[in-house]
Each structure stands twice: as structure tokens, then as C-alpha cells.
Amino acid sequence: MASEAPLTSPTRLQLSTSIILNRSPILTPVQSDFQKAYHEYQYKIHRAFANPFPKKFYFKEGTTLEQRFQAEEKLREREAFGIGFGSKGKKTALPPDSGEQPLPRETEADQKMDITSLDRAGDRNLYLLLKTKSGWRFPQGVAQPGDALHVAARKQILQDCGEDIDTWLVGRQPIGFLEDKEKIFFFKAHVFAGQVSSTNDFAWLTKQEIKDRVDEQYWSGVKDMLSEC
């Protein structure tokens, strides 16, 4: 009778937590040509059917604020309905403004392509990646015995990012799982202020930039956890 092979216990993989630390967009996305045409059309309809603005309730007659409002209103009407609209009647010169202008969408960090700055790609989601021996990875560490996974994730943020960054862990449940030589549970977190201070080998990257820097197997496991924009 043939002897039976001894039973071997299956290999136990260690548990790790990984944090997808996200900086949400701080600018509205650039509109497509179709979106611009749609909003311009809706703007014209709104102005055509809107009730007259009760300017006498808000502005004292003859004041600089009233003159500014009338001049700006004529400019808005011409923008909506054409150059010839509103050309009749008394012309009101636009009083000098304060000179305030909106900041450009492209920052100095965008121009320098500084991937360590949070002031870049304002209309996109940015995610923190660290340079490790295995390549670029989200902050990750082994969960210590006795620690709940979300507690281990909070400890990992502090260990990998330092104390000079204000973050918020979104919930106690992981948003994803990847088995790659170890069992990795991913947690979502947001950054509010500050910057990584514990290492210089880090980058704030968009989803497309992450794809270009990580290996195919890792990308296949994490891509669905990231926002498209």
C-alpha cells in the first residue's frame, strides 16, 4: 500500500494595509466645446425669460454702484444676444474697477512639472505614491497583531507621511483588496492641508500618471479604486 504524503499547512500571507491618499480637485474641469455651447444656450434662455432685476431695491439712484451694474448688465446682454443688442439708449461708462483678476488655472508647479506639489493639476484628483524597492506604490505597511485594519491604516499614514500633513481616513471598511505576495487591504483617505515630511521619494500623481509609473499587475489591481478625473 502506497504511503500517503504528509499534509502541509497552506502558506499564510501577511496582512498589510495600503492608503489611497487623495487630494480632490480644487478647480472645475475644462468644458468641452459641446458643454460650452450648451451652457451658452441655457444662459441666453435664462436671460430672455428672467424677471427684471429690481435694481432700485438694491442700488440708490445715481450712485457709482448703480452705474457699474447698468454698464455690466449691458455687457452681459450683448454677450448673450449679440453686439447690436442694447446699443440704443443712454450709454453708461463703466466705472474703474478694483483691478482684481482671477488667478490663472496653470500654476508655477504645473509649469515646472513639480510632481511633489499639491498645487498642480487643480482640475484633477491627485494621489500620493511613494518610491519603494518594488517601485512606485501607495503608502503601505504590515498590520501589527492586535490592530484593527483601519487602526493600522491610520498608523501607516503617520509613519509614511509624517506629522506635517492633515488627513482624514474615510470610514473603517477597506475599499479594495489585492493579493500580491501578501494580502493588501486598501483604505481611502483625503488630505486637507500640509505636505509629506517623512521622505523625499514621493509624488502626487493623477490616475494616468500612476499608470505610467507602476507595473501592470499592480495597476490592474488598483485602477478601479481611482477616480477617472
Image: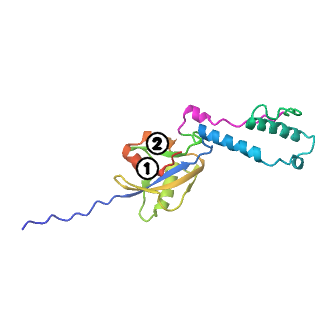
Residue pointed to by mark 1: 222
Residue pointed to by mark 2: 210
Residue sitting nearer the eye, 98 or 140: 98
For disc 1, the neighbor class at 10 Å (few under 14, some 14 to 19, many from 20) is some
Q: What element carries label 2?
A: helix
Image point (59%, 46%), residue name? 25
Considering the image in quadrants, where does the N terminus appear?
Answer: bottom left
Question: In this orientation, does residue 198 appear?
Answer: no
Q: Residue furthest left?
A: 1
**Does residue 38 appear left or right of residue 133 in this picture?**
right
Residue 198 in picture, x, y percent from top left: 52, 46
Residue 112 in picture, x, y percent from top left: 56, 32
**Does residue 80 appear left or right of residue 119 in this picture?**
right
Residue sitting nearer the eye, 67 or 117: 67
- Say whether disc 2 or disc 1 marks the residue closer to the N-terminus: 2
Q: Provide the residue span drawn in magenta.
A: 96-115
Relative to 137, is 155 above or below? below
Image point (85%, 39%), residue name? 70
Image point (74%, 38%), residue name? 80
Residue 77 in picture, x, y percent from top left: 78, 38
Query: Is residue 100 shown in magenta?
Result: yes
Residue 107 in picture, x, y percent from top left: 62, 35
Question: In this orientation, does residue 179 appear?
Answer: yes
Residue 31: which quarter of the image? top right
Pointer 2 with pointer 1, Cβ within 8 A: yes
Residue 182: which quarter of the image? bottom left
| Mark 1: amino acid | Val
